[in-house]
Amino acid sequence: SQLDAVEGLRKIENPDPLLAPKALDQTLLDPKYYYQVRIAAAEAAASLASGGRLEKAESSSNKRQRISRDETDASITGEWKVEQHSAPFVAFRSLYEFLKNRYYDQANTLWKANDFKDLPEYFLKRGVITALSRIKDIQGLTDTRVVTMIKQLLQKNDNTGNVYSDSHYLADLIRCLGRIRLSETEDRDEIRNQIARYLNYDQVLPSYQNLVSCACLEAKCELEVSGMLKWTKDEELRNERCKKYTPFAAYPNYEKIRESAAKCMVQIASIFAAEVRHLQGCIDYERAPGVKRRMIRSWAESWERLPGVSKMYHRAERSEDRPVRRAVRHWRKWLWRVLNNDGDEEIRHSAYRLYFVVFGKPRLSSGRKLRISASKTGKYNQQIYRQVDGMNLDVMTRWKDAYDTLKAQQQGVLME
């Protein structure tokens, strides 16, 4: 009932416009409420702040400029100017001051060190930061104070005196960094450097399940797709935007990293058709059946939510650009081969969903519609499973050794 009340405050229009943000602020500050209710109040406040059509502040004292309308007016900063008694301003201020008052040391002008002993407070901090990063103005840009806060939290993160891991907390901060939207006049190098720094750091000292690396890949992809980070000219000319993600999508990287890299390539391939060949090769070379299933399943689920993918790939298949046309046609043949010949029933079903989304109902050469029949796992996979069960190594090493051994045995039989 409390969650329904929070949702009602977000949606229902009240005669008093300040009623909803003030009620949400009181819910956020009251420790008697369950922490998930307080997080829902923060998300509702962020929704009110984003829907308020915040305007840019005009101030010549701030050197950091958001956008420039023309040559005569270049004094627009990234801080928002709204009436101090309006609902968007009250909602934004409640979230921003909540973090400042609780986690910022005014005397030393630094963010306090991490202390996750109070678990509800820990989840609340993560939820408020995430909600604050989602607030955008009418032009889709992020407030300068929010950008500075997220950068400082990443730069000055201190977990030395904390007995708990900060992997999930850092992953949330990095994903918040991926949601930042800046104007053309603002520098993006610091964002790129922070993502590269944490990505390299997680390679040396891995976080729990490599959560930091996964968040870095997802944030970088989101910033590139949104235009915040630019691709190089060589990547654009050679259609190699996904190439930087292929090393992370290969063994011996952890499973979560490989799946996150594949999701990033799926997102890029939904915009640029020629990039699909990198994703195809990534799935082809994946030897772990579980990871391969999850990769192609998430691919199908992602594109089922994008109705424009089918039209784009139909145009690309008839494109005058020869590399694009060749890549799409080759991928269609590969998808048809997987759909008909793969021994894994789940992979065939995901391939069928993907083919249906992009090219429509698959049909045989005779014109009859193809039906995916349930069948047992192929003999090749069954033999590998038997060898894997008899080895006392980790899962990935066992699968690779069994795969190579069985392949060598079959090649030896063929040569004899």
Image (cartoon, rainbow, N blue to C red):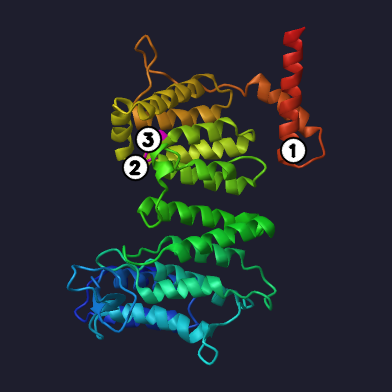
Depth check, front residue: 37 or 81:
81
User: Which numbered dot is residue 273?
Assistant: 3
Q: Could you say where residue 10 lies in the image, as x and y percent from the top left?
A: 31, 70
**Which comes before the other along the chain, label 1 or label 2?**
2
Majority secondary structure of magenta residues? loop
Q: Secondary structure at mark 2?
A: loop
Depth check, front residue: 328 or 209:
328
- Residue 124 seen by the camera: no
Please name which of the two marks, 2 or 3, marks the residue nearer to the observer. 3
Callouts 3 and 1 close, C-beta under 8 Å: no
Q: Please, what is the three-letter code of the amino acid marked with disc 1?
A: Thr
- Residue 51 seen by the camera: yes
What residue does disc 1 label?
397
The magenta-colored residue range is: 270-274
CA neighbours of label 1 inside 10 A, class few (<14), some (14 to 19), many (20+): some
Residue found at x 43% / y 20%: 371
Q: CA distance from mark 3 to mark 1?
A: 34 Å
What residue does disc 2 label?
306
Residue found at x 47% / y 24%: 334
